[in-house]
Amino acid sequence: MKHQVESQIIANRRIHGDYFQVDFNAPEIARAAQPGQFVHVRIPLLEHRVLRRPFSIYNVEPAAGTVSVIYKVVGEGTECLSQTPADTVASLLGPLGCGFTVPATADVQPVIVAGGYGCAATYLLARRSPRKPVCLFGARTEADLLLVKEFEALGCEVRIATNDGSRGHRGFVTALLEPFLKAAQPRPVAVAACGPNPMLKAVAKDLLLHGLDGEISLDHAMCCGVGACFACVIKRKSDNPDGWEYARTCIDGPVFPASQTVWD
């Protein structure tokens, strides 16, 4: 169930570089949020703008009533959010979208593949999984890696790839997935991925090559966030004559089965 609430910002701090974490007081959303869902935020310093901004939910603490988001300053909206002080009230709509499936038992080995701050959208999945995931984190440089210690504190094994080789494997994070999938079979695995679309396309391809499916969280620009405007559509497979149909990432996703996604 989604809620629209006027939420006080408890804290808004820089993690490092252009990455920030903002904590909202939003008990209704904190109690309802599932891994992989998002909130649609009306940024206080942009009240003159009609559209909200979508942010993946990083963490929730239902007892404290808090909802946390991690974001990177990349444009006017996130720049204004980074300048918003604590105690400011912001309008939140959420939790929105279809999230990741939490494995029902510890018999399944979860595997998280994340690029950049895509790891934030998978943190709740790691927290709630009966068996702690193996996490494959990729970034351009070591400075772009996030939340490694936080995932390790949950008991996750974290394997790292950086494009420039400044930490871990030199290259794309998808290079870490291929040998893992080979070694994992026939043990049941549940792959969840979030990051740039080229990474997600490569993950989906690797899964299908191994006869496996998984879940991917598609990063797509959204306007309304509730399925009304059809601005965030992607193609997914269907039984109609064209073999595909449009799906809205805001309500049909943002998490989709990898096997359903049509890549142009």
Image: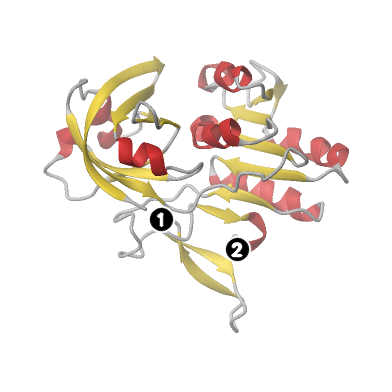
Residue drawn at 60 percent across, 17 percent down: 153
For the residue marked with disc 2, what is the amino acid? Val
What percent of the width, then of the height, locates residue 85?
20, 21
Q: Quadrant of the C terminus?
A: bottom right
Q: Nearer the viewer, residue 239 or 26?
A: 26
For the residue marked with disc 1, what is the amino acid? Cys
Q: Nearer the viewer, residue 152 or 130?
A: 130
Write down the residue under mark 2.
262
Residue drawn at 62 percent across, 79 percent down: 239
Residue drawn at 76 percent across, 43 percent down: 189
In which image quadrant can residue 184 be found?
top right
Residue drawn at 33 percent across, 54 percent down: 225
Q: Is residue 165 left or right of residue 90?
A: right
Residue 224 drawn above or below residue 35: below
Classify mark 2: residues with Cα within 10 Å, few (<14), some (14-19) or many (20+).
Answer: some
Given this view, does label 2 or label 1 mark the residue nearer the observer?
A: 1
Q: Which mark is residue 250?
A: 1
Question: What colour scheme does the image use?
Answer: secondary structure
In which image quadrant can residue 211 be found?
bottom right
| View extreme (bottom): residue | 241
Mark 2: which secondary structure?
loop
Q: Which mark is residue 8?
A: none
Classify mark 1: residues with Cα within 10 Å, few (<14), some (14-19) or many (20+).
Answer: many
What percent of the width, then of the height, locates residue 242?
58, 80
Give how far apart the Cα atoms at labels 2 and 1 are. 17 Å
Task: Give the mark nearest the N terminus, 2 or 1.
Answer: 1
What percent of the width, then of the height, locates residue 229?
31, 64
